[in-house]
């Protein structure tokens, strides 16, 4: 495990303390789980962005192929 220093806004810290107390969960565990969920969320966002980009590229290539097939059919 890595040790780090973390500065939280007072409001966020107070909310975190209330929630961890209610859940009977260690603050460290709660923050680890929160960061993990945020990482998963951002990985999905990045994947979505990549898929949209690649889908656009694939779409353009597919249209070119379609036009080539149409030319072949029209030539028959």
Image (cartoon, rainbow, N blue to C red):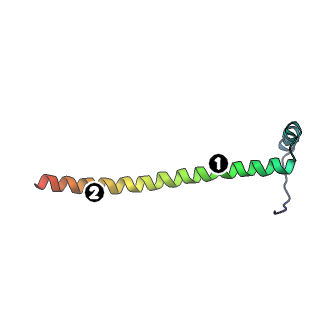
Left or right: residue 50 versus residue 37 is left
The answer to whether 4 is drawn above or below residue 59 in the figure is below
Question: Residue at image x 86%, y 44%?
Answer: 25
Name the residue at the left extreme: 76
The residue shown at (76%, 49%) is 33
List x then y, in percent, for residue 67: 24, 54
Residue that sits furthest to the front in the current view = 24
Left or right: where 66 falls relative to 45: left
Rendered location of residue 72, percent (x, y): 16, 56
Residue indicated by mark 2: 65
Is residue 51 rendered to the left or right of residue 19?
Answer: left
Q: 2 and 52: which one is in front?
A: 2
Label 2 sits on a secondary structure element that is: helix
- Which residue occupies the foreground of this view, 56 or 76? 76
Residue drawn at (47%, 54%) of the image = 53
Quadrant location of the N terminus? bottom right
Q: Residues within 10 Å of mark 2 (few under 14, many from 20)?
A: few
Please tell me in which quadrant of the rendered image residue 64 appears. bottom left
Query: Would you place residue 74 above or below residue 10 in this image?
Result: below
Residue of label 1: 41
- Helix, strand or loop under label 1: helix
Q: Position of residue 12 (x, y in %)?
A: 83, 43
């Amino acid at each position: 495990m890595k040790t780090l220093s973390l500065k939280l806004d007072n409001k966020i810290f107070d909310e975190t303390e209330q929630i961890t107390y209610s859940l009977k969960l260690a603050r460290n565990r709660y923050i680890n789980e929160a960061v993990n969920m945020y990482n998963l969320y951002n990985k999905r966002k990045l994947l979505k962005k990549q898929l949209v980009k690649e889908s656009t590229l694939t779409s353009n290539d597919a249209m070119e192929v379609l036009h080539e097939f149409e030319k072949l059919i029209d030539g028959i």
